[in-house]
Amino acid sequence: MIEIPGFDPMFDDAMWAVNWQAIPVALIPPGEHPGGFRVERRFLHEAMIFDRPYRLSQPFDCRFLYDPEGRLWMSNTPQEHIMMFNNGSASHGHVLVGGLGLGLYPQYAAAVGAMTRCTVIEHSPAIREIVEPTLSVALADLISEPLNVQTADIEIMLAGPVTTRYDTVFLDTWPAMDPIYLPAINRLRDQARRHLAPGGRVLLWGYRWMVQLFEQACAQVLIRPAHARRSWLETDAKAEPPVLALLAPVLDHFAGQSLEDLDAALVWCRQHIITVTGA
Ligand SMILES: C[S@@+](CC[C@H](N)C(=O)[O-])C[C@H]1O[C@@H](n2cnc3c(N)ncnc32)[C@H](O)[C@@H]1O
């Protein structure tokens, strides 16, 4: 497996965690916010966690954040908590966070990880206004310096000059755990690695999960006879153009080859999707 300094592509933040519910996490207050944003409080009795349905032993306190058009934007589901717990546990030192969201990750990074300082880059002024007050109070006794939130675009910041070096960079700005985002995420990751202090690491929400989904898609294609792969993808699987574009290098690499060893082929696919960069 290719080495990427400062990044472990096998780190799996979608693994089950046992202690996450023991960590108190402050949630934003329900209510109406300027600009038409709205936060609702609801208790969940069941939830999907990593594609499996669960009945929860206790009602789970949840916030649903709606945008001015009434669309659900974010919520703190149990799966979200587990993933933030896992990323937080792997964090240390001065942490740069891309995407404030509901402010879960920094609380885990301070409580179960070894975060000492926290700088958050959030591009939505509304999210900052809604979440920063709750998060500042929650972190006050846990880290040595006050929370530093800046309204900016993390992509522009990471592409720019290196001014501060961080022990951890945690990025969670893409809309879903879908492998089509991986080339752009890899580009962001490589820019983030420039900003690391010695011994630092980059953590990316859902990365291993997305790589696994890509490998599963590759396996589905590669088990077909070599001559039938492209037509199967286009006609039977009805793959959309972004999926076709993502899988095109796999089709090209294995063109004309009937595969004896699918596992070996999937190792190539994994290496490819971990290293490919794009817009
Ligand atoms: C899913 S949320 C992050 C959840 C967060 N990890 C938590 O613990 O609650 C994604 C956040 O990233 C922000 N965001 C998206 N693109 C961004 C960008 N280019 N620069 C900065 N923030 C961005 C969104 O406004 C949103 O607040």
Image (cartoon, rainbow, N blue to C red):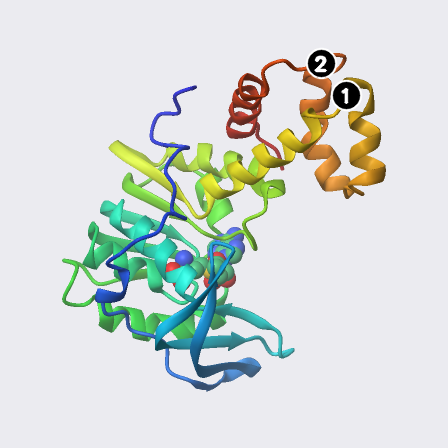
The residue drawn where x is 51% and y is 82% is 38
48 and 162: which is toward the camera = 48
270 displayed left or right of 198: right
Q: Quadrant of the C terminus?
A: top right
Q: Which mark is residue 148?
A: none
**Which x, y percent locates residue 166?**
28, 41
Q: Quadrant of the N terminus?
A: top left
**Which x, y percent locates residue 235?**
85, 38
Callout 1: SS: loop
Callout 2: SS: loop
Q: Residues within 10 Å of mark 1 (few under 14, many from 20)?
A: some
**Identity, as a three-letter code, of the amino acid under mark 1:** Pro
**Which x, y percent locates residue 256?**
76, 12
Report whether residue 268 is seen: yes
- Name above or below for residue 178 compared with residue 262: below
- Name above or below for residue 221 compared with residue 114: above
46 displayed left or right of 103: right
The residue drawn where x is 44% and y is 48% is 205
Report which quarter residue 179 is drawn in.
top right
Q: Which mark is residue 225?
A: 1
Q: Which mark is residue 258?
A: 2
Instruction: Decide if ligand 1 comes within 8 Å of the CB at mark 2.
Output: no
Report which quarter residue 151 is drawn in.
bottom left
Cα separation between marks 2 and 1:
6 Å
Dots 2 and 1: beta carbons under 8 Å?
yes
The residue drawn where x is 64% and y is 30% is 218
